Image: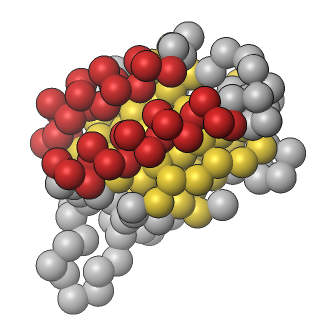
Amino acid sequence: MNVVPEQTAHGNWSTYSKVSMSGFGTCSIVVVYNKHGFLASNISAGTDLEKDAMNKLCTTYPSIKSTVFENQEVKVLILCEQMNIAKGGLMRSAVERILPTEITVRYYDAPSFLGTSSMTPGCEFSIGPGVNGFNAVLKGANGNSAKPLTEPTGVLKCP
């Protein structure tokens, strides 16, 4: 499943092997996940857009907690453009309402595709279940992978 900017989506891993998000350069993403499913939001920059997206995510969660997450604990991954460090903290505060067991906030560095003639996204993010947990990857438009998101620190440079 591909979640484009301004979209929030959810599903079960039995139906989707991974969830991808594109449109990077100005977007942030938030993924709530566990071994059963996910709730993902691809958020374009803009205070009102971000507030609306976070409200939608946090109000959707209770209605799908039993069907998507089977009432089990969840984790949250937040990925923001490095110039939006303050937004990562605000998003973290918002998702604390759903009481996840872990919140990871990471930052990426990618060229903005806005205002270019091609409007081609510079990066694509994907997450899905793997052999030992979850695989989270940030790829450049050229298909090269950045440092895995399992690395605990550092800004991810989109290749």
Q: Residue at x 76, y 29 (%)?
A: 66
Against 83, residue 115 (above or below) is below
Quadrant of residue 51 within the rendered picture: top left
Residue 73, image x and y in percent? 67, 15
Against 69, residue 140 (above or below) is below
Q: Residue at x 72, y 48 (%)?
A: 11
Quadrant of residue 62 within the rendered picture: top right
Horizontal relation, residue 73 to residue 95: left or right: right
- Foreground residue, 89 or 128? 89
Q: Residue at x 53, y 16 (%)?
A: 100
- Foreground residue, 40 or 20? 40
The quadrant the C terminus occupies is bottom left
Residue 146 visible in the picture: no
Looking at this view, name the residue that lies furthest to the right. Answer: 14
Looking at this view, name the residue that lies furthest to the bottom. Answer: 117
Residue 75, image x and y in percent? 57, 22
Against 41, residue 106 (above or below) is above
Residue 62 visible in the picture: yes
Horizontal relation, residue 39 to residue 122: left or right: right
Against 147, residue 11 (above or below) is below
- Foreground residue, 76 or 93? 93
Residue 155, image x and y in percent? 27, 34
Q: Residue at x 66, y 61 (%)?
A: 1
Residue 107, image x and y in percent? 29, 36
